[in-house]
Image (spheres, helix red, strand yellow):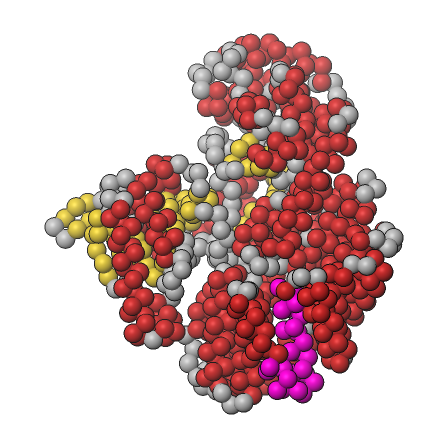
């Protein structure tokens, strides 16, 4: 185990020498107690880092978990790396490659993060671990697989390569020549390469293997984008943006970066092909590797047809999966299955109870029956016949569950399968054993080709509408459970909603098409807070479409109107935000919903404030705070009151504004509302700077950024706003011009990646900062600092801000 303190220099500046020394000593005490409690031996200590050896992997993991928990309440954040192996023992201590690997793993992490190598994960099991995929580490020749203790969302690891390629569980058999051909086409300059072939022919696996080979070649990374759950071509570019960290302005985000995107299962949204071709033409160093059952038929496309496996490779694949020896019966079976990889895997799943000859005998009748089909690729008919044969061999309860599970898009948890499909664990396990269902971590899922077949069986069962209703009810309940927590505990709830985003989309689609438009409006309005944090384009598109389709004056419409106002404002469209918020307020009042009226008053106030009508906004915020308190919601009353103080500032009543903010800060701290505490401190910092108290202003803004870091892990929208405010304060205070430029640039990049617009008040903050900074730095120094800032991720930008001195 290796441990290290994150941001020790910044922490020293923030705490001062005396307090920092005390915090460091307490951190050492906590770590040493956790080491000792689990058999750890301290090998070496340098500064604030430890190198510890443990007799067991589980002991090291338990020590790390205990240390992280015990350090959580203190100011010091420690990154921990654990690796298992046999080092060389010398008189000076341990040396060898395993020591270097452990140190590199620890260095790749962030404060509060525990990283575990694959060798350690193999010893402790993967329960409670989150697979972060393969990464290349400095000075190590081969990529290594890294796991994280817990599933919390943190910034990307600090590794050489940047990739999210899936890590298939099963071995890759055959196709070595095909991998070389695909790699060669991309290396020779193919900008848009499409792998075509029927479902089950192995396009996705071939593409993943080829892309993995190319990871070291692309400086900006290799990213897999799964498109199977999508049905709306308009969402393809946004899904790509979400994957690589850019929502709007995708072409600007990619720019000249050397990037490979693997777009998997494009056929059902192939109408997006012209936009993809334009993206490739706009970004000179972007290459696309696409899997599809049909060609995109756009300019610049290069096709690579994925053929069935060669006979020897097909036999090798079947024998590897079936754990049997090759023979004539195996060769005949493979040929009968057209050497299709998925068909072979499904057949091999039966090898535990049937010999290859018996499998061939039972399959032959169905295959002969379907060979005459003229409306589909014969290989596709073979695959369907194989899936049908596997389905026919299922027990009645297995067939029923198999069909019901098709209702889930993007997989499901065990709890969701039990609640929606009446699943029981034994039947689920049986479907997994038969290769009709997959299991990764805590989620179950189907290959898209198999899910298509299961969906047909669901339609035939007569249960489809009932299952989709239960599915929609389940995910509407999840959205409503998450709604009040999304902004208070974004790390937990945004990750949970992100995992279920495809199911939420499917629920919305079904509610809309089945005549349940009111519930669709309710669900879409409920998801507005989630969409705001990274899916603005999709959220706005869905809300406006639903609102245009059902104009009845209901609570569902009122909620969707408020959500649409939020989407519009965060996209920089104040006029639409004002219109939608005004409609929401009027409808909530008509329905007698005081809380809804208070919420809509806030949104309308923000919209008219963006347009410069501060007097009307002040009244709306005042009304809203009173309504929230009348409804017993002190948390939202704090938010409305903070905005009220902002309006007093804009109207020139500085003393009244300061009094309102200070009272609100006291209330927020009493309720431990960190969000309002940070926002109010930011307002007071700006006012302190106006009074000439630059040091106080900087100190308060550093407190704001510490809160942002703890709440959002340095990657949220509020962090982007606060970095801009801090940059303005640094600029006006003087003495840290280059740091201020970097922070402005980083904040702009973060907003672009989230898809957020620039509101008038933020534009004013940025304009004031830039006007001063251009007088402090010459053009060359400004440009250099701006370019440096574009590369800073959230935590790095916060660290720079906390380290700044005026």
- In the image, 302 versus 48, the foreground residue is 48
Q: Name the residue: 61% across, 33% down.
A: 417
Q: Vertical placement of 739 versus 36: above or below? A: below
Is residue 491 found inside the magenta-colored segment of the image? no
- In the image, 298 versus 59, the foreground residue is 59
Count of marks, rendered view: 0
Q: Vertical placement of 567 versus 663: above or below? A: above
Residue 61, by quadrant, is top left
* Residue 208 image offset from top left, x and y in percent: 53, 41
- In the image, 662 versus 353, the foreground residue is 662
Task: Look at the image and tell me whether residue 254 can be seen.
Answer: no
* Residue 155 image offset from top left, x and y in percent: 48, 57
Image: magenta residue range:
635-659
Q: Vertical placement of 56 versus 708: above or below? A: above
Q: Quadrant of the C terminus?
A: bottom left
Task: Look at the image and tell me whether residue 86 can be seen.
Answer: yes
Q: Name the residue: 60% across, 9% down.
A: 361
Magenta: main secondary structure: helix
């Amino acid at each position: 185990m290796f441990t290290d303190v994150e941001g020790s220099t910044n922490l020293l500046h923030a705490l001062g020498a005396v307090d920092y020394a005390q915090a460091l000593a307490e951190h050492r005490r906590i770590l040493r107690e956790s080491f000792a409690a689990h058999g750890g031996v301290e090998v070496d200590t340098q500064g604030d880092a430890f190198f510890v050896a443990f007799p067991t992997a589980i002991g090291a993991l338990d020590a790390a978990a205990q240390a992280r928990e015990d350090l959580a309440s203190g100011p010091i954040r420690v990154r921990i790396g654990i690796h298992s192996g046999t080092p060389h023992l010398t008189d000076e201590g341990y040396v060898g490659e395993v020591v270097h690997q452990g140190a590199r793993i620890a260095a790749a992490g962030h404060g509060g993060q525990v990283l575990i190598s694959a060798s350690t994960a193999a010893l402790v099991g993967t329960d409670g671990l989150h697979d972060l995929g393969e990464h290349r580490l400095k000075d190590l020749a081969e990529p290594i697989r890294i796991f994280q203790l817990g599933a919390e969302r943190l910034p990307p690891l600090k590794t050489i390569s940047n990739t999210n390629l899936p890590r298939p569980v099963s071995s890759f058999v055959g196709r070595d020549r095909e991998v070389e051909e695909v790699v060669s086409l991309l290396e020779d300059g193919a900008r848009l390469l499409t792998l075509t072939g029927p479902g089950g022919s192995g396009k996705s696996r071939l593409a993943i293997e080829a892309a993995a080979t190319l990871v070291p070649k692309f400086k900006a990374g290799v990213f897999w984008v799964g498109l199977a759950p999508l049905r709306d071509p308009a969402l393809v570019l946004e899904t790509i943006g979400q994957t690589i960290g850019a929502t709007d302005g995708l072409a600007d985000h990619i720019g000249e970066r050397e990037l490979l995107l693997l777009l998997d299962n494009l056929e059902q949204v192939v109408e997006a092909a012209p936009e993809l071709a334009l993206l490739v033409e706009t970004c000179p160093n972007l290459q696309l590797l696409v899997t599809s059952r049909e060609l995109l038929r756009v300019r610049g496309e290069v096709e690579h047809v994925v053929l069935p496996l060669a006979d020897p490779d097909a036999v090798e694949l079947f024998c590897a999966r079936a754990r049997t020896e090759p023979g004539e019966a195996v060769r005949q079976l493979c040929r009968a299955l057209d050497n299709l990889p998925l068909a072979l895997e499904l057949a091999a799943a039966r090898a535990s109870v049937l010999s290859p000859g018996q499998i061939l005998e039972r399959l032959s009748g169905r295959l002969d029956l379907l060979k005459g089909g003229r409306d589909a690729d014969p290989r596709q008919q073979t695959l369907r016949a194989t899936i049908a044969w596997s389905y026919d061999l299922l027990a009645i309860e297995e067939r029923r569950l198999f069909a019901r599970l098709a209702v889930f898009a993007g997989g499901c948890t065990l709890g969701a399968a039990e609640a929606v499909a009446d699943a029981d664990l034994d039947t689920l396990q049986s479907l997994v054993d038969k290769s009709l269902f997959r299991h990764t971590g805590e989620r179950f899922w189907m290959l898209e080709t198999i899910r298509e077949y299961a969906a047909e069986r669901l339609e035939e069962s007569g249960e489809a509408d009932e299952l989709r209703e239960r599915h929609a009810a389940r995910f509407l309940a999840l959205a409503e459970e998450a709604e009040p927590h999304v902004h208070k505990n974004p790390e937990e709830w945004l990750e949970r909603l992100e995992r279920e985003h495809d199911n939420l989309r499917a629920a919305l689609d079904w509610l809309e098409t089945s005549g349940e438009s009111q519930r669709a409006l309710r669900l879409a309005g409920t998801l507005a807070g989630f969409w705001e944090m990274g899916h603005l384009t999709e959220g706005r598109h869905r809300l406006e479409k639903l609102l245009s389709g059902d104009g009845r004056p209901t609570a569902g419409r009122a909620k969707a109107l408020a959500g649409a106002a939020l989407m519009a404002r965060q996209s920089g469209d104040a006029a639409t935000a004002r219109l939608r918020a005004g409609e929401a307020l009027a409808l909530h009042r008509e329905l007698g919903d005081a809380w809804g009226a208070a919420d809509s008053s806030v949104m309308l106030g923000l919209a008219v404030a963006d347009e410069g009508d501060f007097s009307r906004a002040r009244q709306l915020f005042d009304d809203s705070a009173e309504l929230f308190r009348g409804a017993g919601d002190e948390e939202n009353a704090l938010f409305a009151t903070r905005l009220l103080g902002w309006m007093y500032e804009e109207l020139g009543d500085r003393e009244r504004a300061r009094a309102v903010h200070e009272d609100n800060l006291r209330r927020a701290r009493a309720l431990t509302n960190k969000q309002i505490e940070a926002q109010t401190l930011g307002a007071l910092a700006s006012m302190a700077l106006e009074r000439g108290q630059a040091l106080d202003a900087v100190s308060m803004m550093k407190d704001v950024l510490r809160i942002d870091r703890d709440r959002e892990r340095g990657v949220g929208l509020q962090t982007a706003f606060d970095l801009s405010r801090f940059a303005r304060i640094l600029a006006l205070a003087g003495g840290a011009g280059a740091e201020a430029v970097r922070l402005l640039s980083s904040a702009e990049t973060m907003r672009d990646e989230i898809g957020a617009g620039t509101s008038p008040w933020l534009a004013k903050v940025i304009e004031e900062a830039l006007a001063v900074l251009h007088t402090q730095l010459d053009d060359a120094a400004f440009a250099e600092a701006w370019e440096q800032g574009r590369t800073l991720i959230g935590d790095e930008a916060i660290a720079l801000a906390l380290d700044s001195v005026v």
